[in-house]
Image (spheres, rainbow, N blue to C red):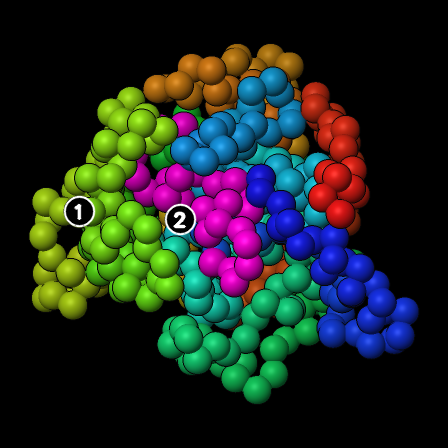
Amino acid sequence: MELNPDAWSIAAQLDRERAQDNLRGPLHGLPVLIKGNIGTRDQMQTNGKASLTEWSMFRSDNSSHGWNAVFGQTFGAYHLRQCPGGSSGGSAVASDLGLAWATIGTETSGSIVIPSERNNIVGIKPTIGLTSRYLVVPISEHQDTVGPMARTVEDAAKLLQVIAGVDPHDSYTFDSPFQDRIPDYPAACRLSGLQGKRIGIARNVIDGSSDEVSHVMKAFEDAVSVMADAGATIVENTSFTAFGEWKKRKYNPVTRVDFMSNLPRYLSQLERNPQNIHSVEDLRAFTRTFPSEEYPARNTSNWDTGIEQGILNTSAAFQAMYRANLHMGGPGGIVGALERHSLDAVALPSTIAADIPGMVGTPVISVPLGAASAATPVQHERFFTDVVETAPGIPFGISFLGAKWSEETLIEIAYGFEQKTRVRSTLARQVEPRVDLADVMAGRR
């Protein structure tokens, strides 16, 4: 994690303003860490701040979650050398440990939801267009989104409230139905949030992912009972009908083509570009020759595929790829399940909740559900065996998936579930922070 060297003076100024009843907004003075792929006009690096998986997990197919060449490997706090999930792993760990009131992450396909579940926090992956992506290093304009990560649903809702809105720098925000007024997301945190809701269970997704969720299912089934007891109507077998088709894919072609188009545009807008990187080809050449990047132990396969395809997202070939995604995520995915069964949400283990909504830009909220039992075998990441993927005590979550712009309803459901279960406070960390921001900044004053 990189700290802003101006943090102390900024905090002091905000304290003076608060003492004079001059508040800038509802979160005045609360420290919020942002993910390292979000540009800021200050002394910090764009790839600094809260550590992330390098290039938002979009460089290698043989790297480890939570690693980048600037800070090395980030670990979660619930097992020694725990994989924190990616790519917003640093944001998740910092939020869990209380290194800030809350954090901001980004997601293309799982990068908020997965780290949130693995670090026992709440993560909201918003509808694409609800929050601006301006100054975020892009992966895919059709899938990237920015969202809050916090220790409670209410805190995440409060942060979402202030980052949602229209931005002339991001045309996707013009599609939001909330052009004049953002819903009151904190007000959606009601104890009765589950009452009367229709919540579907996509059993074919669970059954098709049994290896990934077997250690979660006892807690998940208990959660379904909790929701029913709280007044929700549980609708079984709300299948994602194209899930089998999606499972056959080796990768998502849309994100690779988007990256080839979006990254050069981002690079062209930089005020400084000391390595003269202007294209994905330039980026690959630099990465393969700069020692800290650990190539070829960590390859560039995702970029290789995009370069080999040789097309941009303005081509007819791309449009066919994008239509396929819209089908698998839409009528054949989350949208179809919601509409066919008149659902307010679909519930899934967080581990398998992100990919289908990612293709169509619909929202997901992950809430703590439990942790792997003492009988869970320790499993390491495939290519970097010093990182623990699964082990006793590592948290997992439950996710609620909804239609576009349904964050208010999803927050109601998530808050109602969180208050009925209160799992977060029951899980034990093996690592605790021993310093405070004041300790770190004291030597810089």
Tell me the kind of residue under disc 2: Ser
Answer yes or no: is residue 229 visible.
Answer: no
Q: Secondary structure at mark 1?
A: helix
Tell me the kind of residue under disc 1: Glu
Q: Left or right? Give the position of 11 relative to 61.
A: right
Q: Left or right? Give the position of 112 relative to 287.
A: right
Q: Would you call the spot at circle 2 few (<14 residues within 10 Å), some (14-19), or many (20 or more)? A: many
Tell which of 237 and 50 is nearer to you: 50
**What label sits on residue 167 in the rendered view?**
none
**Image point 15% across, 60% down: which residue?**
312
The rendered magenta stretch, by its main secondary structure, is classed as loop
**Image point 29% across, 47% down: which residue?**
275
Q: CA distance from mark 2 to mark 1?
A: 24 Å
- Determine which residue is flagged by label 2: 109
Residue 132: give x, y in percent of width and height: 47, 68
Q: Provide the residue span drawn in magenta.
A: 39-64
**Image point 58% across, 39% down: which residue?**
1
Residue 186 appears in which quarter of the rendering?
A: bottom right
- Determine which residue is flagged by label 1: 281
Residue 16: give x, y in percent of width and height: 85, 67
Answer yes or no: is residue 425 visible.
Answer: yes
Q: Would you call the spot at circle 1 few (<14 residues within 10 Å), some (14-19), or many (20 or more)? A: some
| Rendered view: 331 above or below 395 | below
| Rendered view: 46 above or below 393 | below
Residue 24 appears in which quarter of the rendering?
A: bottom right
Tell which of 170 and 109 is nearer to you: 170
Tell which of 54 and 130 is nearer to you: 54
Q: Is residue 305 magenta?
A: no
**Image point 29% across, 32% down: which residue?**
290
